[in-house]
Image: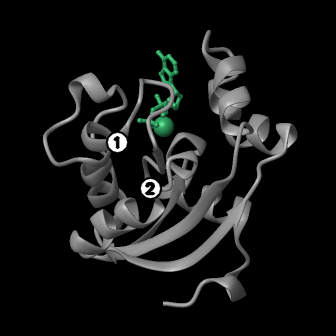
Amino acid sequence: MAVERTLSIIKPDATRRNLTGKIIAKFEDAGLKVVASRRMRLSQADAEAFYGVHKERPFFKDLVSFMVSGPVVVQVLEGEGAIQKNRDVMGATNPANAAAGTIRKEFAESIEANSVHGSDAPETAANEIKFFFRDLDIVG
Ligand code: ADP
Ligand code: MG
């Protein structure tokens, strides 16, 4: 399988509870490498643009409010099959459906405050990485 890069975000519910290290350990234990990372506060415009694909969904407004409610950690993960591997380590969107050992099973508070974001396909991964990082910021 090819080496890929994917965009990961540690969400405000997790930074608020000081869980960044525990979450990053899950990625590293699965063979994913953090090749770029920044702690930041999303603006309203950033969050609306990033989640633009969901703008017609009933939860969009709440999701944007949640994502700007505290710091996030945006990061690029690299590894064999990184896009799917990250999704596997994250677990299902709703923590009630997430498998044992996944980040969302262990740490998520709710379907909305579910601790992590991960790109869902090669094209979205490329676009989401570009949204936050310049090529120079990514060091494999
Ligand atoms: P994922 O993050 O697993 O790719 P989606 O892309 O479907 O999930 O949704 C983006 C984010 O929107 C979720 O991670 C979650 O924070 C929020 N979300 C999704 N579905 C709901 C819902 N039914 N109610 C509230 N928030 C939701
Ligand atoms: Mg998604």
Residue 50's quadrant in the figure? top right
Q: Position of residue 125 (x, y in %)?
A: 52, 58
Q: Which residue is mark 1?
A: 107
Depth check, front residue: 99 or 87? 99
Mark 2, residues whose alpha carbon is within 10 Å: few (<14), some, or many (≥20)? some
Image marks 2 and 1: residues in contact by CB distance under 8 Å:
yes
Q: Amino acid at mark 2?
A: Leu
Q: Is residue 128 above or below residue 37?
A: above
Depth check, front residue: 44 or 20? 20
Mark 1, residues whose alpha carbon is within 10 Å: few (<14), some, or many (≥20)? many
Residue 34's quadrant in the figure? bottom left
Q: Amino acid at mark 1?
A: Phe
Q: Position of residue 88 (x, y in %)?
A: 24, 50
Q: Quadrant of the N terminus?
A: bottom left
Q: Residue at x 34, y 25 (%)?
A: 94
Depth check, front residue: 57 or 99? 99
Q: Residue at x 32, y 40 (%)?
A: 104
Q: Seen in the image, is 52 located left or right of residue 118? A: right
Q: Which residue is mark 2?
A: 19
Q: Is residue 73 above or below residue 113?
A: below
